[in-house]
Amino acid sequence: MSPNYIKTIARPSEELVRKLGKHGSATVHEAMGRIGAMRSSIKPLAKGMKICGPAFTVSAPPGDNVTILKAIHEAKKGDVIVVDFSRITDSGPFGELTAVECQTKGLGGFVTTGSVRDSKEIIGMGFPVFSSALSIVGTVKESVGRINHPISAGDVVVNPGDIILGDDDGIVVIPLAMGEEALAASDAREAKESAVKEKLRAGGSIFEIYGYQKVLDRQGWTEA
Amino acid sequence: MSPNYIKTIARPSEELVRKLGKHGSATVHEAMGRIGAMRSSIKPLAKGMKICGPAFTVSAPPGDNVTILKAIHEAKKGDVIVVDFSRITDSGPFGELTAVECQTKGLGGFVTTGSVRDSKEIIGMGFPVFSSALSIVGTVKESVGRINHPISAGDVVVNPGDIILGDDDGIVVIPLAMGEEALAASDAREAKESAVKEKLRAGGSIFEIYGYQKVLDRQGWTEA
Amino acid sequence: MSPNYIKTIARPSEELVRKLGKHGSATVHEAMGRIGAMRSSIKPLAKGMKICGPAFTVSAPPGDNVTILKAIHEAKKGDVIVVDFSRITDSGPFGELTAVECQTKGLGGFVTTGSVRDSKEIIGMGFPVFSSALSIVGTVKESVGRINHPISAGDVVVNPGDIILGDDDGIVVIPLAMGEEALAASDAREAKESAVKEKLRAGGSIFEIYGYQKVLDRQGWTEA
Amino acid sequence: MSPNYIKTIARPSEELVRKLGKHGSATVHEAMGRIGAMRSSIKPLAKGMKICGPAFTVSAPPGDNVTILKAIHEAKKGDVIVVDFSRITDSGPFGELTAVECQTKGLGGFVTTGSVRDSKEIIGMGFPVFSSALSIVGTVKESVGRINHPISAGDVVVNPGDIILGDDDGIVVIPLAMGEEALAASDAREAKESAVKEKLRAGGSIFEIYGYQKVLDRQGWTEA
Amino acid sequence: MSPNYIKTIARPSEELVRKLGKHGSATVHEAMGRIGAMRSSIKPLAKGMKICGPAFTVSAPPGDNVTILKAIHEAKKGDVIVVDFSRITDSGPFGELTAVECQTKGLGGFVTTGSVRDSKEIIGMGFPVFSSALSIVGTVKESVGRINHPISAGDVVVNPGDIILGDDDGIVVIPLAMGEEALAASDAREAKESAVKEKLRAGGSIFEIYGYQKVLDRQGWTEA
Amino acid sequence: MSPNYIKTIARPSEELVRKLGKHGSATVHEAMGRIGAMRSSIKPLAKGMKICGPAFTVSAPPGDNVTILKAIHEAKKGDVIVVDFSRITDSGPFGELTAVECQTKGLGGFVTTGSVRDSKEIIGMGFPVFSSALSIVGTVKESVGRINHPISAGDVVVNPGDIILGDDDGIVVIPLAMGEEALAASDAREAKESAVKEKLRAGGSIFEIYGYQKVLDRQGWTEA
C-alpha cells in the first residue's frame, strides 16, 4: 500500500511560476491545446483573486478536514493546496483560522471542490481562495485521507507539483512536464492576440482577419 | 430550405429603445402582462450592466463559435447579439477580442445561454455582457449555425428585432410589435409605483393601499 | 384547524439579538453544536449584508405573495420576515416597494427560499435581503398561506421567534430557547479562536496546537 | 436542553393509516388544501412502492448514520423512519443490512433526504424506501443527532407521528391532527373525481364540466 | 394584440406523421442536420412510450393549468399538446383526469416542461406523456395563457403544427416545412446505418469503415 | 510530449476480474477503505446492468467522438471503455452502432461522463452502458483527444487497467495495484455481513450487534 502522505514532490521553478502567473487562465488553457480546465463552478472568493503555484494535493474524506490541516502544516512557501472534498459542497472545512496560517506561511493559495466560510475575513486578508460555494456547516476530525497523491478536482487530474493557475475566469491545471512549453505557447498566443486587438480597435473584424468565411462556405452557407 | 443568414430584419426606432431602456426589466415584464422573462441564471458579468437594443439572433452549434463571429461582423450599431448556445454552459465562445470588436462597432450588448471568458477585461471595458457562467473552455470553428432566425434563449422565443432589455435582475424580451404598448404600460406602472412609494415612506402599507384583506377574506382567512 | 395567522409569538430580548448579531453565522453554528445552517444557496443580495432578529414566519403558496404582504403589514420593528416559498425560485415576490415598506417600519430583514427583484434599488437602500436567486417573474394574489406557523426554510425548521442570523457565509437559525446558551458558547469560541489566531500569526500551526497527529496515528497514518 | 431522543410520541390509529393508505399522495395533498408535498426529487427506489405510516423522525449529522441505526432499533411496527440527512445526497447510510432489520421488525418504510445503496437487494425484498439518489459512498459513526424532534425533510416540517404517505408521484406529510379531516376530504375528492372520470370516458371535457370558460372570460380571453 | 387562442393551424398529413413515427428521435435529429433536440431532462413517464404528431402549443402561466384544460378541450385527434410551463418543475398540472380526456379524444400525446402526477394510472392507461419530473403539487385556475403561439419548450422553438417526435432518448421537433425533407433524410440515414450494422456484426469497425484515421492524422495523432 | 495513444497497458488477470465481479460496488468501495466511488449520477442504462473489467481510458474533446471510435477499434476483449467527456452531458457520442461494435468485439462495457442515445436498442442488446443522461444531440469528428492516459471521470482518477466495477448502485474504480487486496477485503466483508444478516433475520439489531450505544454515550446522548 502507498503511504498516506508522500513527502517528496517535484516542483516547478519559481521563475516559471512567476512568468505563467502573468497570463490569464483562458490564455494558457488555449495555448496548451484546450486541456486542464477545472469546472467553472470552482470560483475565487472575490473578483480579482489570482493564484499561481505548484499543487500540494489533498484527498479529504467527506466532511472531515484533519488531513487538510496536516497538509497546510506540511506545505512549502508558494504551494497551492488543492483539495478533493469529493461531492460535498455543503460543508466548510476552511475558514479564517486556516487562512491566517496559510498566509503567515506564505502559501500560494487554497483550492477546494467543497466550500469555505469566513469569506468576509478571508477576502479582507487578501489570501486567494477558490471554492464551489460558501457554507457554515462544520466538519469533523476523525478519518484520514491522503496527501500528494494524484487527485481528481473539478473534473481534472491534478498531480502534486502541477502548476495551478486561477483567476476570475476559473482555474487551469498545467502538468509540470508541460510548464515551459505552456509558457512559450502562451507568450506566442498573447503576442498574436495583441496584434489582433490593435486591428479590431482600428475597425477590423475577427471574422475577416482569420478568413472564417471559408469555414462557412465549406458547409454550404446561404444568405438572403 | 431557409438560408443560414437572413440579412434583412425589422428593428425598433432608436427613440423607443432609448425610452424603454430607462425602465427596469421587472417593470416592463409586469407591464407587458408577465411574459418574456428569460431564466434568471442568465446574468450580467458585473452588477450595474444595462442592456437595451434590438436582437440580432444566433443559433450556434454546441461548442462552435464561428457563426457568432460572423454575426458580430454583420450586426449594426446598437444591436444586441443573442446567442442560443444550446445547453453548453461549460464553454466560453466570447472573450476580450470579441468584446473589443463589439464595442468598437458600437453594438448594444451580448447575451448568451452559454459562457464567456476574460471577464475581468470585459468588465473593465464596460461592454454589457449577460451569460450563464464563466468558462475558459475553448471552442472550435467547424460547423455552421443560423443568424436572424427565431431562437429559444433562456426559455423565451426571441425573434430578430425584438427588444432585449437587461439589468441586474435579469432579461426581458419585448416582442417588436408590442414595443410601444409595453412602453406606455411601463410608464403608467412606474408612475403608479412612485405614488405608492410616497405613501409607503409616509408609513403606509401595500397590503392596506391595495385592500388585499379582501383577497384573504374570500378564502376564509382566520387569525388568533 | 389552526388559524392562518397566529398573532402572538414569543421574541428574544433586544439585548440578546444585539449581542448575537456581533458574531458570525459560522461561529454560532459551530458553538450550538453544528445545527441550524440553512442551505448555502440562500445568500445576501450584496456582500456585507448582516441580518439578526426574531423570525416572523410565512408559508406562501407557489407564485403568490399576498400572504407576504400581510406579514410585512403585521410584523414588528426588528422582526425578520422568513418566507417558505416552497421550491419556486423563478418568481420574485419581493421588490423595491416591499423593501421600502419594510425599511420604513424598521424590520430587521427579509429571507426567502425564493427570489427577489429590484436588486439594485434594494442594495442601494441598504435593507438586508437574503434569497436563492434574482427573478423578474411576477406573482399573483389569489391564494392564502400561513403566518407564524413553524416552516421549513433552506432545510431548517424555523419557528416564529427563533433568531435568524445571516451574513456573507449564510444563515443560521437559533432556536429561541437556545439563545442565551448559543451566545455564551459563541463568546467562548470567539475568545478561544482569538488566542489561536495570535499563535498562528506567530508562526504556529492549527495541526500542532490541537495535537491532531494523534487522530492520524489512531488511523494508522503513514508517510514516505 | 432537550434530550437527543424523545421516546414517547403520539401516533395515528392503525385504521386511519390503513384508510389513508388507499389514497394516492396527490389526492391527499389536494384534499388537505395543497400543503405537505415533499420536493419531488425524493422518489421510491422502484415504481410501485407505497408507504403509509407514522413518522419516526431522525436528524443525522452529515455522513454519519449511527443515529439512524439507533432509530431503527427503537421504532415500532408500522413506523416510517424519516431522516433529515441535511444536504448530503452523495452518501448512502442505508443498505441491505438495515433494510433486513427494518423489514424483520415490520417497519412501515424508510424515507431519507440523502441516498441509499444495495438498491437491487432492497427492491428484491420489497421493503419501501424513498430517497434522493443512490450512492455507494460510506458513512461514519462518530457524531450524534436527534430522534423524534421536528425535522425539515424535502422542504416540509415533519413532526414525529405525522402520517407519511408516499407513492410513485412523491410523498405528502399529513399532520397528525389533520388526519381524520384529510381522510374525509380525500374520500370526497375521490368520489367526485370518479364521477368526472365517467363523464370524460363518455366524451366529456374537464373544461366544460367545471365551466372554466368563465375564468378565461374574466381575463378578457380572445380567439381568432 | 394577438388573440389568446389561434384557432386555425396548419398540420402535417397523417401519412407523414405515420412514416416519421417509425424513426427514432436520434435518427431524425441527425438527419435534419442536428437541430430541434429538446433538453434531455424532458423524458417519457415510462420506457417505451412513443409520441408523434402535430404540436398544439400552450403557454401556461406559472402554476396555473386552466389554459391547458382549454387546449385539451380544443385539440384535434392526433395532436400533441406541448406546454411551456416556464421554469416551474415542482407543480403537476396534468394527471389521471386530464389523461383520460386526452385518451378518449384520441390525442397523440402530452409534453410539458413542467411536471405531471398520477404517473401510475397514466402509465397503466398507456397514454404517452413526457415531462421534466413528477410532482403532486397542485395548480390554480386564475390566469390565462396562450394557445397556438410559437413557444419555447426544452430550449427549442415549437410552432403549432410542427411535428413532435419522442421516444426513450428524448424529443425532436421537426419544423412543419421540413417534414418531407426530414423523412427522406431519415430513411436514407436508416438504410445507411443498416448496412453499417451488418458490417459491424461481421467484425467491422466504425473507425475503419468511415476512414476516421485521416481525421486523427490531420491533427498530428501520435501513438506509442 | 506524450503520445495521444498509449498502446501498451497493464491489465488485471481474468480471474481477478471474474471474482471481483461477483461483489457489489458498495461492498468493494467499503472494503477498500471508502475510496474510488464515482459520482452517483453516472448510472446504468437499465436496472440490472453489471460491469466489471479493466479500464481503457479516453479523453474526448467536448462534443467530439472520433477518439471514442478509435478507442473502441483498439480495445481488447473484456475492456471497459471509460470516457471523460468533460462536462458535456447534453450530447450523445455513443449509440446503437457503437454498441453493436463493442458487443461483437466482446468488450466489457462502456462508461461515460456524458450521454448516450438509442437506449432502447442498447438495452435490448444487453450491452452494459453507464452514463450521466440520455441525449440525441449529435457529435462532430474534428478534434483529437487521448487514449490510455490517466483521466478524471465522475470525480475519480482512472488509470488505464484499473478495474471498473459497476451495478445499479453506481461505479467503483479499483486501482490495479489494489486489486487482490480489494478482493480479499470484499470477501471478508461479505462473509461478515452474511453472518450479521442471519442475526437480523432472527430479530437482532445492527445497533446492538455492533454495540453502537457506546458511540452515543461518548457524546453525552440523552433520552426522555
Image (cartoon, coloured by chain):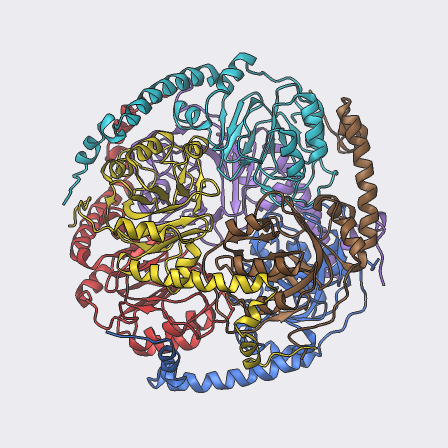
Chain colours: A purple, B blue, C red, D yellow, E brown, F cyan
Q: Percent position (x, y) of residue F214? A: 19, 31
Residue F132: image quadrant is top right
Depth check, front residue: F204 or A215? F204
User: Is residue D82 depicted above or below F121 in this figure?
Assistant: below
Q: Percent position (x, y) of residue B53? A: 66, 71
Q: Is residue E19 left or right of residue E112?
A: right
Q: How many marks?
A: 0
Q: Is residue E113 visible?
A: yes
Can you say which quadrant of the picture contains the C terminus of chain B?
Answer: bottom left
Depth check, front residue: E137 or D191? D191
Q: Percent position (x, y) of residue B37? A: 57, 67
User: Is residue D153 depicted above or below A79 in this figure?
Assistant: below
Can you say which quadrant of the picture contains the N terminus of chain B?
Answer: bottom right
User: Is residue A5 depicted above or below A44 in this figure?
Assistant: above
Depth check, front residue: D56 or C216? D56
Q: Is residue A93 visible?
A: no
Depth check, front residue: B77 or A54? B77
Q: Percent position (x, y) of residue E181? A: 83, 52
- Name the residue located 46 percent from the left edge and 14 percent from the top edge: F180
Residue C110: image quadrant is bottom left
Q: Is residue A30 left or right of residue D33?
A: right
- Name the residue located 19 percent from the left edge and 57 percent from the top edge: C179
